[in-house]
Image: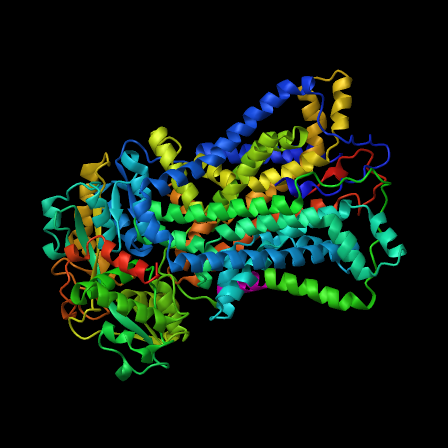
Amino acid sequence: MTSVIEHPAPAPPPGAPKAPARTSPPASRAAPRRHFLLLGAGLATIAVILPLVFLLVQAFGVGWSTLDPLLFRSLTAQLLWNTVSLAVVVMLICAVIGTVTAWFVERTQIPGRKIWAVLVVIPLGIPDFVTSFGWRAIFPSFGGFWAAVLVMSVAVYPLVYLPVAASLRNADPAQEEVARSLGLGRMKTFWRVTVGQARLAILGGAVLVGLVVLAEFGAFEILGFRTLTTEIYTEFNVGFSTSAGCAFSLILVVLGVALLAGESAVRGGGRGARIGPGVARQLRPLPLGRARVAVLGGVALLVGLALGVPVGAVIYLMVSGGGSTLPPASLIGAAGNTFLYSAGAGLLATVAALPIALLSVRHPRREVRLLERSNMLILGVPGLVIALAFTFFTEHYLAGFLYQTPALLVITYAVMFFPLAVVSVRAAVARSPIGLEEVGHSLGVPRHKVFWRVTLPLITPGLAAAFCLVFLESATELTATLVLHPTNVQTLATQFWSYQSEFSYSQAAPYAGVLMLIAAVPSYVLGRWFDRLPARSAVAQAPGPAPGTMVVL
Amino acid sequence: MKRTPAVMVSLASVLAAALMAVGGGATPASASSTSITLYSGQHVQTTQALVAAFEKKTGITVSARYDDEDTFVDQIQTEGKNSPADVFFTENSPPLEELASKGLLSSVAPSTLANTPAKYDATDGKWVGVSARVSVIVYNTSLVKASQLPTSAMQLADPKWKGKIALAGAETDFQPIVTSVARTYGDAAALTWLNALKANAGSHIYPDNETIADEVNRGQVALGIVNQYYWYRERSEVGASNMHSKIAYFAPHDVGYVLDVSGAGILKSSTHQAADQKFLAFITSKQGQEIIGHSQSWEYPIASGVTRTGETPFAQLQPNSITIAQLGTGAEAIKLLQEAQLL
């Protein structure tokens, strides 16, 4: 996902060295480090590619004669239409909601701006199955295409909001002012200049949204909307055939490839335009005037739909009571497990993303680009397929070593959500001027010390963002968890599933509630850290370029 | 850059905590006592009650995993000879038949097979029947009168039920009914019937029987076919005062009146065969069957002399005569469901 960061570079604060036009260091100096990075990137890619290999072997293992009647029938066409139309509509809606919300929060004097900046990010941490569950609890007949569109849109728009807000924050305000002074209207300025500046961020975010929608299962299952992914689970569930499920998964992978290729085509092959380092200064937020109430109402509506419905439903179900015939399980124990597995996955994915991110920014070659892109595909592969792939490899090649251990569960989460980590870390690396590293080298500081003392501090905010995103997704994962969790160990998601599938809604609710609380923490951190970007807080106090280099995605 | 060290320290401490959890999280049962792993597609209540009583009686520890029984079939086959599973406990016979057909199950001890009627066990003795359920109509009492209910599953194809019936084509419990219809009337008629059902269901196509029972009870749809115990279980959970639905039986021996058997088998790859056999012997023993007879999962115990309280006595049920062997792995039903584009 190279595009996300390829919007104009931030303006380094006064005193910072000017970012060089080209980011590649001289080849001779880079060689050893490049090999080291290639090794790291290769290892991570192998782990991520393994499930895809499993998918191919399984799908073609049964032979074409079995797959042909299954794949080429009217249902497949229907599912393809459902999936593609849903993905496209949700991508469009998220692009609009994410961009407009980011603009209001970043560029206007919206009342309570700091609170909104956090609240609009939190929906990312709410499990989609809890959101769907909440809507159905309120409107029993809630379902179908538009229900799926609504639930997905309010759940994943932060994937567009975050990079666009970062982009707006870093963009040169002078361009908008020039446009305005030349007589361009406010709407036209927004459309041509602001959206134009954030174009690549919007596109990158929308692609993530598309991939996430492709692989979504829980929400659509509850809403009764059939997509390729729900069909994959059905095939796994009734046919006793891994192959049929894998064959359908293959269609998803092809759709994922098409999405990524489409993004490349729209973006244009080259790197994003870069403006010269302008003069860093505070952006003056626009006064909203009479539009204030309408804007406030709109953002409140969004947060109400995204947060109010699931939170309200959970509280209602907890209060409404009702017994359960299931024995009580430990809420604290499950919460602890969820926290630790998700944190482990967040850290692993973040660390593993570093080599690829460094490589793709510092040594942007064709094969590196391919390596990076191939990692993205995993986001479109259903969790159950990934879980079965790791089952296969540990059981057949490691004699069961790691299988159903916390370590493998953590690795699986890290693989599933690896692209989110890569995107975040890469964005941070791209924003850290290589000039600073070169200064370190020229002063005779050893390479590894430069990394620890210069590079790492520069990209820390990006690492934190990567950690938070992977943490959020891992905490709410269910299908792979059911296959791979250590026996006798429960997580919040597995407990919620147990109770919910036994009609024990009031017992299921606290698990959903704690899950949302746990997920709200990284979302809050994400929102707050992001809010401390220098464009808003005092620019002058930051002597180095560090905080200014932060881009969440 | 000032807060960077704090960020790094906090990240590192989270890493340390997570790694400790990762290292110490797995707590294998003590090596001194025997421990077996149970993959259960059965309901949690029944399984936990049986496991607790078994552990108390024998001292053998049972670690249970829960998931969809069909996912377990994929999982067990993917695991291969290193599968951690010792015993597989299901709600329906087809998953066990599927594993048996792949040669993955050991033979059950004859004394255990003798605990329950032979017609509810695998014909080749690879798994033992444990409990039973029967398919019924669940209907919303304010949307449809008892006197108007169909008496045969075939009548549900009548256009007069358009928009009124719920259907869960992907539900494992539905396959035996499809098999039954195909056995009685032939594949072509079964497909026509399925297509009519699908048309009548319209937008009321749900993922499983739990959803059907719930949607009917909430008045979203008039009626549907489920196994009888879903209704009882929902009543247990939400309370009798919140029930707006009832169940009705098909006419005796109707094609839709199918008895489903829940069973258990032992994985050939298990290294605890003796303990596994003890578990199967226990759940089919009088003590095990009585636990099922009183459990909140509302299934029927099938050993003679043990009865279910609180619902129509097992002996009074009049299901059709389709056998376990005829139900098989359900492959025939799945093919028809795929042709009807329900799968």
In the picture shown, does residue B171 fall above or below A437?
below
Which image quarter holds the N terminus of chain A? top right
Q: Is residue A315 magenta?
A: yes
In the picture shown, does residue B204 fall above or below A13?
below
Q: B209 or B337: which is nearer to us? A: B337
Q: A227 or A104: which is nearer to us? A: A227
The mark tally for this picture is 0
Which image quarter holds the C terminus of chain A? top right
| Residue at 33% from the left image edge and 29% from the top image edge | A399
In the picture shown, does residue B254 fall above or below A246?
below
| Residue at 57% from the left image edge and 59% from the top image edge | A89
Q: Which residues are magenta?
A: A307-318
Note whether residue A417 is visible.
no
Note whether residue B70 is visible.
yes
| Image coordinates for residue B76, horizontal then vertical, percent | 30, 42
Q: A81 or B148: which is nearer to us? A: A81
Q: Residue furthest right?
A: A181
| Image coordinates for residue B14, horizontal then vertical, percent | 58, 36
Main secondary structure along the magenta-highlighted residues: helix
In the picture shown, does residue A257 fall above or below B184?
above
| Image coordinates for residue A168, horizontal then vertical, percent | 75, 49
Would residue A460 be found to the left or right of residue B103 on screen?
right
Q: A48 or A335: which is nearer to us? A: A48
